[in-house]
Image (cartoon, rainbow, N blue to C red):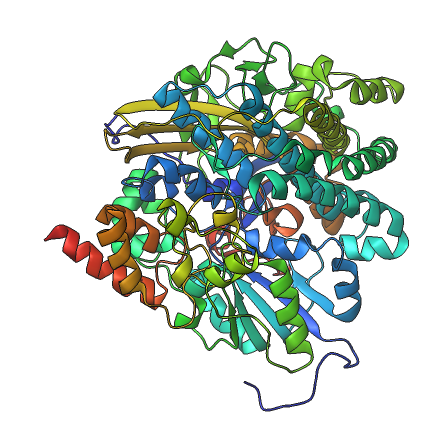
Amino acid sequence: MADRSKTIKVDYLARVEGEGALHIDYDDSGVQNVQLKIFEPPRFFEALLRGRDYLEAPDITARICGICPVAYQMSAVHAMENALNLKPGGALRMLRRLLYCGEWIESHMLHISMLHAPDFLGYPNAVAMAKDHPEIVKNALEIKKAGNALVRLIGGREVHPINVRVGGFYKVPEARELTALVAQLEMARDLTERLVRWSAALPFPSYEWRRDNHYEFVALTHPSEYPMNEGRITSSAGLNISAQDYENHFEEEHVAHSTALHCTLRERGAYLVGPIARYNLNRDKLSPRALQLAEEINFTAPCLNPFQSILVRSLEVLHAFEEALHIIDRYQPPAEPHLKTEPRTASGCAATEAPRGLLYHRYDIDEKGKITTAKIVAPTSQNQKTIEDDLRLMLPSFMHFPEDKLQGLCERAIRNYDPCISCSTHFLQLHLNYGQVQSKQSMVTGKPGQPPAR
Amino acid sequence: MVSNQQPIASSNPPPKLAVWKFTSCDGCQLSLLDCEDELLSLAAQVDIAYFLEASSEVKEGPFDISLVEGSITTPADEERILEVRRQSRFLISIGACATAGGIQALRNFADVQEFTDVVYAHPEYIATLKESTPISGRVAVDFELQGCPINKHQLLEVISAFLHRRAPQVANHSVCIDCKLRGNVCIWVAHGTPCMGPVTHAGCGAICPSYNRGCYACYGPKENPNTESLCHWWDEKLNVENTLIVENLRNFNPLAPSFKVQSEDRQEDGER
């Protein structure tokens, strides 16, 4: 494990968010080349974590992403606990799930309302959309606010929570602090039901182009729960492994056009993580109201249309509210806020379900608890190849579109994945080259805000 | 400061706001989107002309107020920040990356080539600078809002202050003051828990002590901190290991001068 030289490692910042560009070459015979280029500056977390204290891992890795810091904290503490052979159960386990519910709500709602919905209604942003559809935006903000309230109470603050600790928490809430949130959560849950119905009625583009090229969906699966913090890594093609086996089946490749590494399944190549994969592999474990509503609107599994990710996210938000209310209803504070932790030389790993999909962490620590190696594989890195495949498969059907409409469609196809994150609304500089003309220069200098270049 | 003394709040057309991202996690610009109750009313008062995280619509500069998140870590960023400054009447840097280099500034104390080799299979594909630099290290800045992440209420206060041409009411005192106001028992005095609160800038609401853990200084130094004295007390009275002291000075604000100087002294002590 200490041998670093053979492992391809990932700079996760580039994977979790990003300034990016898209480069497509095509001619009369079809699409020749699609490159999703992430040129987010590297931040070197895996390198700078070395030598840091094991208790700092959740605080430091939270800073990979301001949108889903809880996901980084959850994978980090579970990996450290795997190393130290600790298993927080009971109320501590429930509280972690409750915190994750809060993050799913706030992150999904940010994507749904600010980034994704304006696409379907033809607006450049939520503020412009709010002028014509004020109730949709205001309700979405109310729902998001309830998620923020959960994260703030359990985590201390909405962005980069401070209360997550290896072994549990620094402080656990009183039951009355949680029940004080119930009315707000119930109100937001009811608004979410309306959101699900609204998103089900959106005009979704067709996905015929994927009919003969099925995705391999990858997500955690738990025997009795919709997956969040725990479970086996499973796929629609029959993969069924523990997190400890992750690196035997998945590998990363460093390509020239992206500062984010590309992740593939050794056996089969590109795969898809995220809400659609979770839903397809775990639909039967949705909460009662979410499942009932899915049936009512006749939304079955598998969902094969990537443009319907907004609908799956809405259902997951509803699930998260129900799950949160269920946990609060049964909550009894644990005797201690965290299990006793004693560092020792050890290695551990874990995978959890970030809002955007599977997030894998592995650490080695020494006898004093100092980190000696760290490996982090973020969801966006895992989806990059699938995003490129989507574009490659989709474009031939739409090549007759005018260029601006084609660019809009490409942006939407990428936004379906909620690539984390600044990229999500805007990140596209599209280079469409007809024939063999190709400017290498333009591949690396794209900046957001520049007009599309021919 | 620009010489024009006219308030810009009520100008017609409305003042143009831009939000720029450099090397960062997006958390500080997210604080703006987390203003669920204020976002739409803010949008009614300013023209959000450039905010790529929130809008695919991009308007031309110049801009009345630019909020800048992130530090400068690539050759392309070095160029871009000059252009942002040129286009901006007021430039406000927001967050620990923009004001004190951010966590990625830990490279400044290490060998960036070695960092690149550890993370990437093909280091030759990577263009990065040896150092991560705060915005004020590259261009003149009109105001710095500290915090990792920033406090959204402080952000609204700063925007409002610039719109009305008054001084932002952002307290420079330590976390200890806020901790007392919150009615907390001092975790250092009562429980012997090492805490960075005495030297750390207020703004977070003293959350860590309120959750039974020591402040880890994510808001950076307060005005005129005596960091040397604090480290001495951690060392002498609380028997905290030197490496832990250095880690607390070098996390999210490692280039803030009082933290940087003290961490270098401590590092040298540790190596002697």
Which one is in front, A238 or B272? B272
Give the mark count: 0
In the image, residue B55 sits, relative to residue A117, either above or below, namely below
Which one is in front, A435 or B66? B66
Q: Locate residue B226: give its quadrant.
A: bottom left
Which one is in front, B83 or B135? B135
Residue at figure coordinates x 68%, y 54% from the top left: B33
Residue A263 in percent (x, y) is at 47, 28
Left or right side of A288 for A364: left
Residue at figure coordinates x 64%, y 73% from the top left: B61
Left or right side of B47 for A66: left
Q: Locate residue B76: give its quadrant.
A: bottom left
Residue at figure coordinates x 46%, y 29% from the top left: A338
Whether residue A30 is visible, yes or no, is no
Residue at figure coordinates x 46%, y 32% from the top left: A262
In the image, residue A180 sits, relative to residue B237, either above or below, namely above
Residue A130 in percent (x, y) is at 84, 54
Residue A23 in percent (x, y) is at 56, 45
In the image, residue A255 sits, relative to residue B53, either above or below, namely above
Which residue ends up furthest to the left in the rendered image? B272
Whether residue A121 is visible, yes or no, is yes
Work out which quarter of the rendered image holds the N terminus of chain B and state it.
bottom right
Left or right side of A355 for A442: left
Left or right side of B91 for A129: right
Residue A363 in percent (x, y) is at 35, 29
